[in-house]
Amino acid sequence: MTNLNCGAVSCSYNKDKCCCKGDIQVGGKHASDCENTCCESFHKRSGDVYTSAISHPSPTISIDCEVAKCIYNADYRCSAEHVDIKGSNADTSRDTICATFREKI
């Protein structure tokens, strides 16, 4: 499990910068920088209501990752100890980024 700091506060799964979805998918299969990654699990919040798939917000989460060039991608699972998702004013998943992305060299 990875420690997640979710800055996509407009996401319906975000409660106090913790994710209430249980797991997320980071996309950007051919990304070579963080600007071309995204949280594909992002879902725009409607009003002040958040959606919870788990009993309470958790700072740790399972992250599936399709970003082939990221050093933290280990067989489509994120191996980073800490992940930052950015996108405080996001309207869609494409407005979010995985700020932890580091390109394999």
Image: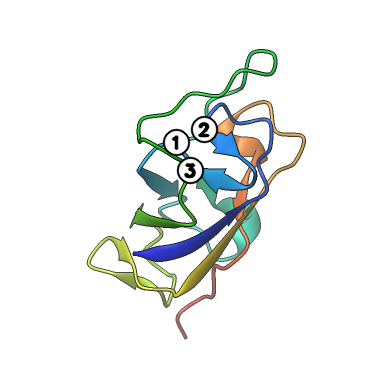
* Vertical relation: 45 (above or below) 56: above
Using the numbered discs, state the Cα–Cα distance from disc 2 to disc 1 in whole angstroms. 9 Å
Residue 56 on image: x %, y %? 43, 39
> In the rendered image, which quarter is residue 2 located in?
bottom left
Helix, strand or loop at label 3? It is loop
Q: How crowded is mark 3: few (under 14 residues within 10 Å), some or many (20 or more)?
A: some
Q: Residues within 10 Å of mark 2 (few under 14, many from 20)?
A: many
Residue drawn at point x = 36 percent, y = 35 percent:
55
Residue ID for mark 1: 41
* Vertical relation: 20 (above or below) 61: above
Residue ID for mark 2: 13
Residue ID for mark 3: 57
Instruction: Out of 104 and 11, give the one closest to the viewer.
Output: 11
Helix, strand or loop at label 2? It is loop
Residue 50 on image: x %, y %? 56, 24
Amino acid at the residue labelled 1: Ser
Q: In this view, does 21 lie to the left or right of 88?
A: left
Foreground mark, 3 or 1, reads 3
Instruction: Out of 18 and 103, give the one closest to the viewer.
Output: 18
> In the rendered image, which quarter is residue 79 located in?
bottom left
Amino acid at the residue labelled 3: Pro
Residue drawn at point x = 55 percent, y = 47 percent:
18
Q: Which of marks 3 and 1 is nearer the N terminus?
A: 1
Instruction: Out of 40 and 12, give the one closest to the viewer.
Output: 12
Q: Which of marks 2 and 1 is nearer the N terminus?
A: 2
Foreground mark, 3 or 2, reads 3
* Circles 3 and 2 in contact, beta carbons < 8 Å: no
Residue drawn at point x = 64 percent, y = 13 percent:
46
Residue 31 on image: x %, y %? 51, 58
* Circles 2 and 1 in contact, beta carbons < 8 Å: yes
Residue 14 on image: x %, y %? 58, 37
